[in-house]
Image (cartoon, helix red, strand yellow):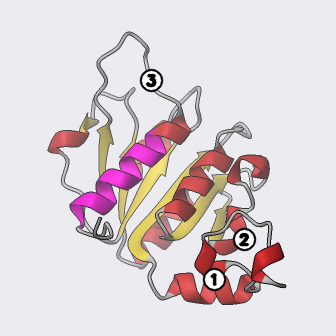
Amino acid sequence: MDASTDTRNLVDKFKGLPNEEIIAELDKSRIPLEIAIENLAHDFNIGTVVRNANAFNVARVHIIGKRKYNRRGAMVTDKYLHIDHFATVEEFIADAHARGMKVVAVDNNRPESKPLASTELVPNSILVFGSESDGISQELLDAADQAFYIEQLGSTRSINVGCASAIAMYEAVRRLGLLPDA
């Protein structure tokens, strides 16, 4: 494939490269953060969360529950990520803890959640997002090591999960000192 005719949604340095080379190059600079999405109701916003995960070059994405999601929102960025599927919360938590990962729930609808501004974000964490309508299941929230919410100023109960994932990933990357120099 020629870089000048490559119509994929890629930054210039990846134009013309086969997917395998892009993945190999991205693997050299993956950040020590993973994302999980609890997919209980085939949420259409999952594709957006996956696209955001690619934008921040997270190490892995985990889909918990239903395997299928709306890939249109991902804009084909899922091809450049490592995506795992776990049928149950129990399987996901066992895998996360076996690898020494900290499970961090992002949910504004739970009394145990703390404000993002006062939450410590550490490397080797998995930020977990729930469905747009119901948030994270109580089972997953109970198994999480910590939970935070994104503070809001307006009248709505929540912001879109795709937007919340972008805010949370950006803040984690910023606090970990992983943003590129401007």
The Cα–Cα distance between marks 1 and 3, rounded to whole angstroms, is 34 Å
* Residue 103 % position (x, y): 38, 58
Of the two numbered discs 1 and 3 in the rendering, the one whose residue sits closer to the viewer: 1
Query: Which of disc 3 and disc 1 is earlier in sequence?
Result: 1
Q: Quadrant of residue 6?
A: bottom right
Residue 144 shows up from this direction:
no
Label pair 1/3, CB-CB below 8 angstroms: no
Residue at 54%, 70% (x, y): give it: 60
Quadrant of the frame with the N terminus: bottom right
Q: Which residue was labeled with disc 1?
A: 23
The answer to whether mark 1 and mark 2 are in CB contact below 8 A is yes
Residue drawn at (68%, 90%) of the image? 21
Whether the residues at callouts 2 and 3 have beta carbons within 8 Å, the answer is no
Mark 2 and mark 3 lie on one chain; the one further toward the N terminus is: 2
Q: Name the residue under label 2.
A: 79
Residue at 70 percent across and 63 percent down: it is 9
Q: Which of 76 and 137 is in front in this view?
A: 76
Which residue lies under the disc numbered 3?
A: 158
Whether residue 154 is situated above or below residue 4 in the rendered picture: above
**Mark 1 is on which residue type?**
Ile
Mark 1–mark 2 Cα distance, whole angstroms, equals 8 Å
Which stretch is magenta? 164-176
